[in-house]
Image (tube, grey):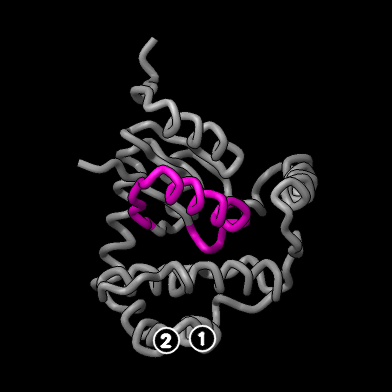
Amino acid sequence: MSRHIDYFFSLQSPWAYIGHRLFRDIAASHGVGVNLKPVMLLDLFAETGGLPLAKRHPARQRYRIVELKRWRDKRGLDFHVQPKNWPFNARLADGVVIAALQAGLDPEPFLQRAFAAIWEQQLSLGDPQVIASLASAVGLPGLELVTQAASDAVGAAYEQNRLDAITADVFGSPAYVLDGEVFWGQDRLELLADALKSGRSAYTSEP
């Protein structure tokens, strides 16, 4: 059976955006499947002891900006560290990813377009019309997906992703779970690539 990675993330997360393209390149180069699992970060934080950005100590908030600038340079990206339409409620945008999967469609082109829309173009992904336009621009049925994204079926899948994250010991975005081993944060992508290259058994928290 081929290996796969459970990819927990939200379009709300700058770190998911920063690492997204490299992650997909790593997975493709090793022939590993990817299970996309959008998750509501505020609910996940509440369950696992994390704090939303506005409630973090000012020193942590300032350091976050510095880290965004460092990784912007490191990954060769060009984005706003404080885009004008962020933060936003990611429920609908994340839901479009789930709706596409449920319809048997590939949401990857939408993800690439949507991440750039937030962080590079400063568009509002809290706006259903913007979301639909982005999906339609990459050949997906944007209006239909936005409508489905608000459905109970997608809401249930979103909640299941949160439960799956908690079960897997995931507590933030992005998190990549390979054979039960969690790699949290896009700054762990090189370690994920090393694990795939070596073929080693998963590390656990056991001594």
Q: Are marks 1 and 2 in contact (CB under 8 Å)?
A: yes
Residue 120 or 31: which is nearer the viewer? 31
Residue 162 is tagged as none
In the figure, residue 108 lies in which quadrant? bottom left
Report the residue at 56% width, 56% height from top: 21
- Marks counted in the figure total 2
Residue farthest to the top, as pictured = 207
Report the residue at 55% width, 85% height from top: 130
Residue 170 or 53: which is nearer the viewer? 170
Residue 159 or 103: which is nearer the viewer? 103
> What SS does tag 2 mark?
helix
Give, as a three-letter code, the residue at label 2. Gly
> Is 24 covered by the magenta stretch?
yes
Residue farthest to the left, as pictured = 1
Quadrant containing the C terminus in the rendered view: top left
Q: Is residue 198 above or below residue 9?
A: above
Question: What residue span does the magenta drawing correspond to?
Answer: 10-37
Give, as a three-letter code, the residue at label 1. Ala
Report the residue at 32% width, 45% height from top: 4
Residue 128 or 2: which is nearer the viewer? 2
Residue 142 is tagged as 2
Q: Position of residue 98 (x, y in %)?
A: 34, 68
**Left or right placement of residue 75 versus residue 3 in this view:** right
> Distance of mark 1 from mark 2, alpha carbons?
8 Å
Question: Would residue 58 be seen by someone viewing this image from the given angle?
Answer: no
Q: Which residue is mark 1?
A: 137
